[in-house]
Image (cartoon, rainbow, N blue to C red):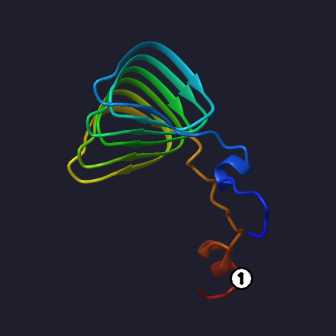
Amino acid sequence: MFTDSKKPRSQQSGLSQQNTIAQGTIIEGDLKSEGDFRIEGVINGTLITNGKVVIGTTGLVEGSLSCNNADIEGKIKGKLVVLETLSLRASANVYGDVQTGKLAVEPGATFNANCQMKDSVKELKTESKPSLQASAKTGQTA
C-alpha cells in the first residue's frame, strides 16, 4: 500500500502476465507455461500450465489441456485435467474426458464427456451415539 515502487502488484509479487492466443491464430504443438492463458484462437496439441485457462467464445482446443482452473466459453475436444475448478459457461462445448476437483455448469452448456471428480469427497465425521436397541435394553427412551 505505501511502497515507493510504481510497478503493478502482479509484477511486484512475481506473477507472470497472461498469455493470449488471438482469434485467427492456430497453434499446433505443445505449450508449457507457469502463467495464465486466454484462448480466442485454436490450439491443436497439448497445453500445460499452473495458471488459469480461459477459452473464449471463439476459442478451440483440440488435444489435451492441464491447468489449475479453467473457464470455458468456447470448445474443447480431448482430455481436460483441471486441478481445482472447471467453470462451463452457457456457450461452452466440451467433448472427451474430464478430470476436475469442482465443476460448475451454466444452463445451456454442452457437456458430452466422461467426468471424474478428484479430491472433492470429504470424509464425514461419525460420532458414536447409542443405538435405539442399546437404549431400550437400559430402559432409556430416545
Q: Is residue 47 above or below residue 19?
A: above
Q: Is mark 1 on a helix, strand or loop?
A: loop
Which image quadrant for residue 68? Answer: top right
Q: Nearer the viewer, residue 72 or 34?
A: 34
Neighbor class of circle 1 (other Cα within 10 Å; few <14, some 14-19, many 20+) is: few
* Picture coordinates of residue 104, whole percent (x, y): 39, 51
Q: Which residue is drawn at 71% across and 82% down?
A: 138
Instruction: Kindly identify the amino acid type of the residue bearing the numbered disc 1.
Output: Thr
Outermost residue toward the left in this view? 108
Q: Residue at x 23, y 44 (%)?
A: 91
Label 1 belongs to which residue? 138
Question: Going by the image, does 119 lie left or right of 115?
Answer: right
Which image quadrant for residue 140? Answer: bottom right
Q: Which residue is drawn at 66% across and 80% down?
A: 135
Q: Which residue is drawn at 65% across and 50% down?
A: 10
* Picture coordinates of residue 11, whole percent (x, y): 68, 47
The C terminus is located in which quarter?
bottom right
Q: In this view, does 10 lie above or below 31?
A: below
Q: Is residue 1 above or below residue 35?
A: below
Q: Nearer the viewer, residue 110 or 130?
A: 110
Task: Tell me how many marks there are.
Answer: 1
* Picture coordinates of residue 12, whole percent (x, y): 73, 50
Q: In this view, does 85 lie above or below 75?
A: below
The N terminus is located in which quarter?
bottom right
Question: Going by the image, does 113 lie left or right of 35?
Answer: left
* Picture coordinates of residue 139, whole percent (x, y): 67, 87
Q: Nearer the viewer, residue 29 or 82?
A: 29
